[in-house]
Image (cartoon, rainbow, N blue to C red):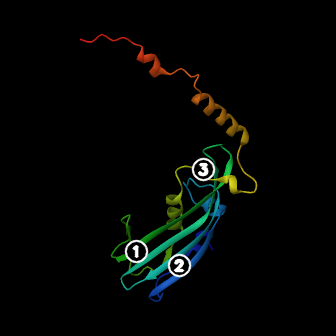
Amino acid sequence: MAYFDQFTIPIKGLHLGIHEYSFVIDEEFFRRKENTQIESGLFNVEVTLDKHIDLIMLEISFIGSWNTMCDRCTADIPLPVQGHSEYLIKYAAKESDDGDIIYIMKETTELNLSDLILDSIIIGLPISKTFDCDSLESRPCDMVTLSKLDQWTDEKTSPQQNDLWALLKGLQLEEE
């Protein structure tokens, strides 16, 4: 059995209505997927499939942590991430992906969700890779980097700094 077969769900012969599936996404998933910015993490994924006669509505919800580098202190952190994505799958003469709607052939018997799960997680990643780590029992922060950052911030905001605008106020310009 290939690794990604575990993310394949049957759709042919599936009764109309709501069906629920659960998956655990770990380092092996990201290692086997190519060209992803996520190298490591652990996510619990819940998939709800609502099958109708002519379409399928798919909801993917996830919660977990992405092992990445903190933007503030550069330490390795388990960044908490959660999100939700919805997909509409319609039957068509040929398979295609419109972006908003995924078209599959009527004869399709199963659907592999691994790419949709990966897309949902990547879209749910925050732009800023920081979080309130004070609530953790042992903070992962690089305290040396944070102290240098605090020192730099204090120097930058000190009143002894040369104020360029104050220097420009004394400049005498001729008016024409």
Residue 98 shows in this picture:
yes
At x 48% / y 73%, what residue is drawn? 59
Taking depth in this image into account, of 99 and 126 the one nearest to the observer is 126
The amino acid on which the numbered mark 1 sits, given as a three-letter code, is Ile
Mark 3 residue element:
loop
Which quarter of the figure has residue 157? Answer: top right
Residue that carries the numbered disc 3 in the rendered image: 130
- Residue positioned most to the right: 138
Residue at x-position 46% and y-position 20%: 166
Residue 92: x, y in percent?
34, 76
Q: Is residue 169 left or right of residue 131?
A: left
- x and y percent of residue 60 in the render? 51, 71
Q: Position of residue 14 (x, y in %)?
A: 48, 87
The image quadrant where one finds the N terminus is bottom right
Asked if residue 123 is positioned above or below residue 51 in the image, the reply reads above
Residue 89 — which label? 1
Residue at the disc numbered 2: 9
Type of residue at label 3?
Thr
The residue that appears at 37% across and 76% down in the rendered structure is 90
Image position of 114 (left or right of 107): right
Number of labels in the image equals 3
**How packed is label 2: few (under 14 Cα within 10 Å), some, or many (20 or more)?**
some
Q: Work out which residue is located at the far left of the displayed protein and give it.
A: 176
Q: CA distance from mark 3 to mark 1?
A: 35 Å
Q: Say whether residue 113 is visible.
A: no
Q: Disc 3 vs disc 1: which is toward the camera?
A: 3
Badge 1 crowding class, 10 Å Cα cut-off, few under 14, some 14 to 19, many 20 or more, is: some
Of the numbered discs 2 and 3, the one sitting upstream in the chain is 2
For the residues bearing labels 2 and 1, Cβ distance under 8 angstroms: no
Task: Give the mark, 3 or 1, whose residue is nearer the N terminus.
Answer: 1
